[in-house]
Amino acid sequence: MARIGFIGAGAMGAPMIGHLLGAGHELVVHTRRREAAQAVVDQGARWAATPAAAAREADFVCTNVTATADVEKVLFGEGGVAGAANPGTVVIDFSTISAVATREFAERLARKGIEMLDCPVSGGSMGAQAATLSIIVGGKAEVLERARPLLETLGKTITHIGGHGAGQVVKACNQVVQVVNIQGIAEAMLFAQANGVDPKKMLVALQAGMAGSRMLDMMGPKMAGRDFAAGIEARLHQKDFGLVVSMTQALGLAMPATALVSQQLNALVGKGWGRDDTSSLLRVLEGANPAANDPGNA
C-alpha cells in the first residue's frame, strides 16, 4: 500500500481521501484549519500542520485546492511540498488550474527529481463520493502507470491526454462545453417563460429530442423548479472561465460564446450568488429582462 500526502479536504478532497483510506493506503492530510480535516482523521488519516509535513515520507502527494496560486503556494511556498518530498515522489494535482502554470510547476519539481501529473476531474462532489470521477491526465505515461492504482480507486474513467498541462487543457474544454450548455438552457427557459409556455413541459419535450443532454437532465429541472442550491458552486465555474479567457487571449483566439458566458458568470457572482448553483445563470437573464415572465428572483 502507498503512503500518500493529501492537501485539501473539501467537498471533493474529503471523499477521495475516504476512498483511499478504504483501499488500505496510509494518508497524511494537510488542511489550513485542523478542524477541516476532522472527518477524515476520524476515518484513520493523520493531520499535518504543513504541506511539507504531509509530503515528507510520501510516495504520492495529492493536491486538491481551488486556484493556481493555491497550488503554487502548497508546492513551493514556505513549508511547501517541494522542500520536503523525496526524489521519485509523484505529485498528483486534482485541481483545475492554468495549463501554462502547470507546465512550469512540473519543470520546477523535475529539477528536484519529483514527478508531476495534472489530473483535473469531472463529475463533481457526487462523482467524488461515488468514486465515479472522470480523471483527465497530463504527464508522462510511465508515471501515470505508477499512479493508476490510486486513480482507479477514485474514478471510473482515466484518460491520458498527453504531456504536462494537457489534462488542464482538456478540463478547460470540458468546462466550455458544460457551462455554455447551461447558458443555453437558461436562455431556453427564459424564452419559454416570456412566451407563456410552461418550462417544465418544454423540458420534457427537449429531453426527448436532439436537444437532450446530461446537462439538460441536471440543470433543466433545477431551473424549472427554481432550485438554485449548489451542486457545483458557480464561483468555481467563474474561476475556470477566467482561466479559459486568459488562455484565449494569449493564443489570439476568438471564442465568442466563451467570452459571453464568462461575462454572465461574472454578473452572477457580482449579484452575490457565487456559492449558489450555476443554474443561477437563469436569474442573471431574468434580471436583464424585467419584461419577461419572471416568477421571482429568489
Image: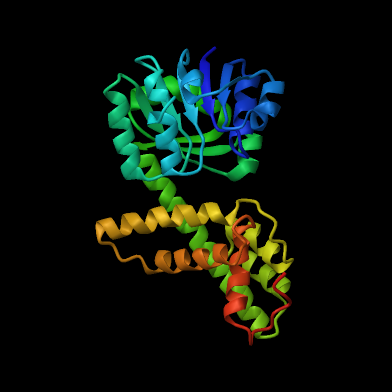
Does residue 70 appear anywhere in the picture? yes
How is this picture coloured? rainbow
Q: Is residue 198 left or right of residue 132?
A: right
Q: Is residue 232 left or right of residue 62?
A: right
Q: Which residue sits at x=67%, y=30%? A: 35
Q: Quadrant of residue 124?
A: top right
Residue 156 percent coordinates (x, y): 55, 34
Looking at the picture, how far across and down is residue 242, in whole percent? 42, 56
User: Is there any visible trace of residue 163 in the rendered image?
Assistant: no
The residue drawn where x is 37% and y is 69% is 256
| Residue 81 x %, y % | 42, 24
Among all residues in the image, which is located at the extreme front? 78
Q: In what quadrant of the picture does the C terminus appear?
A: bottom right
Q: Residue at x 71, y 68 (%)?
A: 224
> In terms of image quadrants, where is residue 79?
top left
State the residue at coordinates (72%, 71%): 200
Q: Quadrant of residue 46?
A: top right
